[in-house]
Image (tube, rainbow, N blue to C red):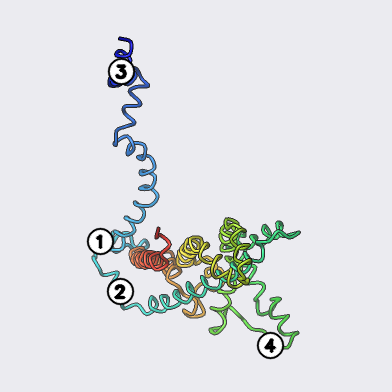
Amino acid sequence: MAVRERTDAAVSPPREVRPRAGPLGQIAEISERRGWAYLLLLPSLLLVAAVVIYPVGSGFLLSFRRMLVNRPRLGTPWIGLDNYRAILEDDVFRAAAQNTVVWVVGGAISQFLVGLIAALALNRALPGFRPARVLILLPWLLPSVVAGHMWALLLDARLGVVNDLLLKLGVLDSPVAWFASATWAFPSVLLAELWRWFPFFTLFLLAGLGAISEELYDAAAMDGAGYWRRFVDITVPLLQPVIVASVVLRVIGLVNSPDLLVVLTNGGPGYKTQILSLYAFQTAYNSFNFGYAAAISVVMLLVLVVFTIVYIRVSRVTRE
C-alpha cells in the first residue's frame, strides 16, 4: 500500500504555480508584455527624435524652400528642386566637391597611417611610454581655434619658424606664404589637420592592440613567422573592426568640420581650399541663403550615408 502511494505521488502532475497577488505580481505580469519594452524605450526614442530626427528632417524640408534671412519679407516659399538645380550649375560647388574628395581621402589615409605607426610604437611596456601615451594626445585635445592660430604663426611668411629653418638650411631662397600660395595652401592645411587628428587614430588603435592576446604572437613566432607576417596575419585582421569604426568616424568628421580651414584659409586662395562644408557654412552665414546651404548639406548627408554603407559592406566587418 505504501509503495502504491509513492508511485501515485511520483506520477502525479506538478501543481500549478500561481503568480503572487499584490503589487509585485502585477509588475511581473506587466513586464512580460511586449508593449512594456517599447514603453521603457520611449524616453530614449523621444531624445533621438529631438536631437537627430527633427533637425535632419527640418533641414531636408528647408532645402526645398527659398530662405534668405536678410530679406525676411520674401518669406520661405516652396521652390521644389530649384536649389538642387542651382547646385548642378554651380562652379564653386564643383570645385568644392573635388577639393572635398582630396581633403577626405588624403586626410583620412595620412592620419590613419601616422596614427597606426604611433600606436604600434607605443604598444610596448617600456619605461616612459605611459606618459608618452598621454602627451601624444595633446594635439587632439587642443581647441581647433588654438591649433589653427598656432599653425598660422608657424607657417607665417615673416615670423614663421618653418620659413626661418628652411632658409637657414638652404631649402628656400625666399620666405613662402604657405596659406596664400595656390600650390602650397592645400598641402599646408592637410599637414595641420594631420598633426591635429592623428592622435584620434592612435587612441582607437592602441585600445584595439591592447585587446589582442600575446599568446597569438608567441604561437606565430614559434611557427617561424616574422614581424611582418605576424602584423599582416594577426594584427590587421583583429584590428579590422576598430579600423572600420575609426575610419568611418574620421571621414564624417573631415566632411563636416571645416574649423581649421576657417581659421587658416577660409577657402582661399581663390577656391583652392574650398570644401563643401565650408561652402555650406559661408552660404548660410555670409550670404544668408539658408535654403541653398540646406541643399548642399543634404547632398553631403546622402554621400556620407552611401559611403558608410558601401565601406562597411566591402570591409565585411559585420559578417559572423
Q: Residue furthest bottom?
A: 173
Would you say residue 262 is visible in this rendering? yes
According to the picture, the residue beneath numbered tag 1 turns out to be 77
Disc 1 to disc 4, how far (Cα)? 56 Å
Comparing marks 4 and 3, which lies closer to the viewer?
A: 3
Report crowding for label 2: few under 14, some 14 to 19, many 20 or more residues within 10 A (C-alpha): few
**What amino acid is labelled 1 in the image?**
Pro
Comparing marks 1 and 2, which lies closer to the viewer?
A: 2
Disc 1 to disc 2, how far (Cα)? 16 Å
Would residue 41 be found to the left or right of residue 81 on screen?
Answer: right
Would residue 167 be found to the left or right of residue 114 on screen?
Answer: right
Residue 247 in the image: x percent, y percent?
Answer: 49, 65
Tag on residue 86? 2
According to the picture, the residue beneath numbered tag 3 turns out to be 7
Residue occupying the point 25% across, 68% down: 81
Q: Which of the two discs, 2 and 3, labels the residue nearer the N terminus?
A: 3
Q: Are marks 1 and 2 in contact (CB under 8 Å)?
A: no
Report crowding for label 1: few under 14, some 14 to 19, many 20 or more residues within 10 A (C-alpha): few
Residue occupying the point 39% across, 44% down: 47
Disc 2 to disc 4, how far (Cα)? 44 Å
Say which element carries label 3. helix
In this rendered view, identify the residue nearer to me: 28 or 45: 28
In this rendered view, identify the residue nearer to me: 122 or 94: 122
According to the picture, the residue beneath numbered tag 4 turns out to be 172
Disc 4 to disc 3, how far (Cα)? 103 Å
User: Is 149 rendered above or below residue 40?
Assistant: below
Say which element carries label 2. helix
Q: Which of the two discs, 1 and 4, labels the residue nearer the N terminus?
A: 1
Where is residue 99, by image quadrant? bottom left
Would residue 177 be found to the left or right of residue 295 on screen?
Answer: right
Residue 64 in the image: x percent, y percent?
Answer: 27, 63
**What amino acid is labelled 3 in the image?**
Thr
